[in-house]
Image (cartoon, grey):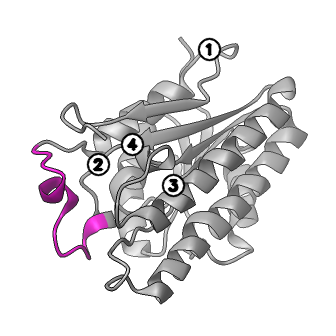
Amino acid sequence: MPSVQNRTVVVTGASSGIGAATASLLARRGANLVITARRRDRLEAIARGLSNVAVAAGDMMDPALPQALIDLAVENFGSCDALVNNAGMMTAGTVEAIEIDTVCRMVRVNVEAAFRTAYIAARYFKKQGHGHLVNISSVLGTKIRPTAGAYAGTKHAIEALSEDLRMELAPIGVKVTCIQPGLVMTELHRHFAVHPKDSLDIDAPLSPDDVAQTILFVLEQPEHVSIPRLMVVPSRQSI
């Protein structure tokens, strides 16, 4: 079975949640990492004591950051073999309660910044002749639930782009995967008045480590095996 050892992976949104868990797991498995998020202190805590992690604090809305991450990977480790496109945010609410400005910011982060990152990575991988783009979508990238339509829309957009890039890049051996987590206990829901685990009656949501293990599984598939989509949900989540 292939390993991530000595492969170089860029992870966005790496200061908490799925990104932090993925970065920590990949580092323990011997991957070289470039990690980014806005909170430098969190990133440096992950990198502390590790010789195979480069930190690049920044905002994914900065148009220059995606290319800078690829460049940093090449500068430090000689190449970039995979990118986990994870940075994102979530807001939800009824028509009366939802903050429209926050919705618009979510669209810019979850779609504009994620698309820019995906395209920059795809161009690099195509020129290189190999690579793996892992886009973090959601179970709501395939479904809708009341009050979460705007968030679901951003993830539907990620699903569409991923399938397009997968078909375009498959002939040259570049892989594209969408990971579709169900409810995960992360900071994504910290602003919600009622946590989704209560509103959805899910007593045991996924942990970030559960999703990180899923990402590792996808990255360690043999060269001839591609996994376009992988949904992972709590066993009691019915949506």
- Amino acid identity at mark 1: Pro
Pointer 3: what residue? 86
Q: Dot 3 lies on which element?
A: loop
* Front label number (1 vs 4): 4
Give the Cα separation between the discs numbered 2 and 1. Answer: 29 Å
CB under 8 Å between callouts 3 and 1?
A: no
Q: Nearer the viewer, residue 95 or 67?
A: 95
Give the Cα separation between the discs numbered 4 and 3. Answer: 12 Å
* Front label number (3 vs 2): 2
* Front label number (2 vs 1): 2
Crowding at dot 4, Cα within 10 Å, few <14 / some 14-19 / many 20+, comes out as many
| Residue found 72% across the figure and 55% down from its top | 70
Q: Main secondary structure of the magenta part?
A: loop
Residue 103 image point, x, y percent: 48, 78
Residue 183, labelled with which disc? 2
- Amino acid identity at mark 2: Leu
Closer to the N terminus: mark 3 or mark 2?
Answer: 3
Residue 106 image point, x, y percent: 51, 74
CB under 8 Å between callouts 2 and 4?
A: yes
Give the Cα separation between the discs numbered 3 and 2. Answer: 15 Å
Pointer 1: what residue? 222
CB under 8 Å between callouts 4 and 3?
A: no
| Residue found 78% across the figure and 56% down from its top | 120
